Amino acid sequence: MGFEKELREKTAWVQDAIEDFFPEEESAAFAGNLAKAMRYSLLAGGKRIRPLLLYESCLLHRADPDKAKPFMAAIEMIHTHSLIHDDLPALDNDGLRRGKPTSHMVFGEAGAILAGDALLNYAYETVLNGFPDSYEEDRALAPAGCTVVREVAADHMARRWRALRILAEKTGMHGMLGGQSVDVENDKRGNLTPDRPMLEYIYENKTAALLEAPLMIGAVLGGANPDEIRRMEIVGSRLGAAFQIRDDILDVTSTEEVLGKPVQSDLTNEKQTFVSLAGGVQEAEKLVRRLTDEAVGLLEEVPGDTAFMKQLIQKMALRSS
């Protein structure tokens, strides 16, 4: 099977998983408008990169992707929450996302704030609802004739808790929200030229943390050891930096029609990015390729068929839209 065909099939699979875990608007009763706003942004398109990375990490670490579906849905909800809030007038004040009007343009600023908050909360609700109420569900995972069924079940439960802890840490103050806060504080204070360490902190946390999480979660659910989990974290870190620098490049070189969102805002605001820090588009491009090569190289140490994930990483980092 060719990469593009496999990508379409796997993307459709994770899309179904996301939709399966989101309730119908009717179930929200009087909060139906909130559910409508949540659904509008969650299902507005997107490449579903984060759940795809989780799916692939599960395969590489011998975890069952079906049992990771709640985490796949949750991480896309968290990502969507961040986009809704990024677009708000108090932050980036963007009116277009994925070629469609942003949430606050459709549902108002208050509606968008609440929709983002609700998606973040519902992400954790989704994961926790996927936990069994007892060991009964996990007993079936023990090999036939196993005499330590309870220990096997306890191990699988422990893996879920470790995965949930990673999701929470990579999302919060020490991850995505921490990075976003530093980025926003710089903008509001007029510090549009942060030094390299601060810019690297922003990129590592604002962008990379939510790519590290699915790679690590797949490894944890598969019972990987700490070194193997750390390796996946570093893959996500390199990919996240490359992905964000590519965003910087596209903000300079692409168009609103191609990207489906405003462009050249960083240039207009004279905001420091890795394009300006590296000395132009060509040098930034070299940095993207180096980081991408490092991420792909780390996967050489992972047993199993890593071909699809390598191609996916290259597609993300070297994209033109």
Image (spheres, helix red, strand yellow):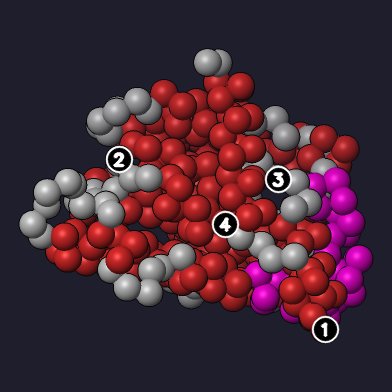
Q: Position of residue 36 (x, y in %)?
A: 82, 67
Q: CA distance from mark 2 to mark 1?
A: 43 Å
> Label 3, on which residue?
46
Amino acid type assigned to the residue bearing label 4 in the image:
Ala
**Of circles 3 and 4, which is in front?**
4
Predominant SS of the magenta segment: helix
Q: Check if mark 2's residue and mark 1's residue have beta carbons within 8 Å.
A: no
Regarding mark 3 in the picture, which secondary structure is present there? loop
Residue at the location (32% across, 73% down)?
Answer: 134
Question: In this image, 102 relative to 270: left or right?
Answer: right
Q: Which residues are magenta?
A: 94-119
Q: Position of residue 159 (x, y in %)?
A: 29, 61
Q: CA distance from mark 1 to mark 4?
A: 24 Å
- Residue 150 colored magenta? no
Q: Position of residue 58 (x, y in %)?
A: 38, 43
> Label 2, on which residue?
62
Q: Residue furthest left?
A: 147
Regarding mark 1 in the picture, which secondary structure is present there? helix
Q: Quadrant of residue 48?
A: top right
Mark toward the start of the polypeptide (2 vs 1): 1
Residue 73: numbered disc: 4
Q: Quadrant of residue 280?
A: top right
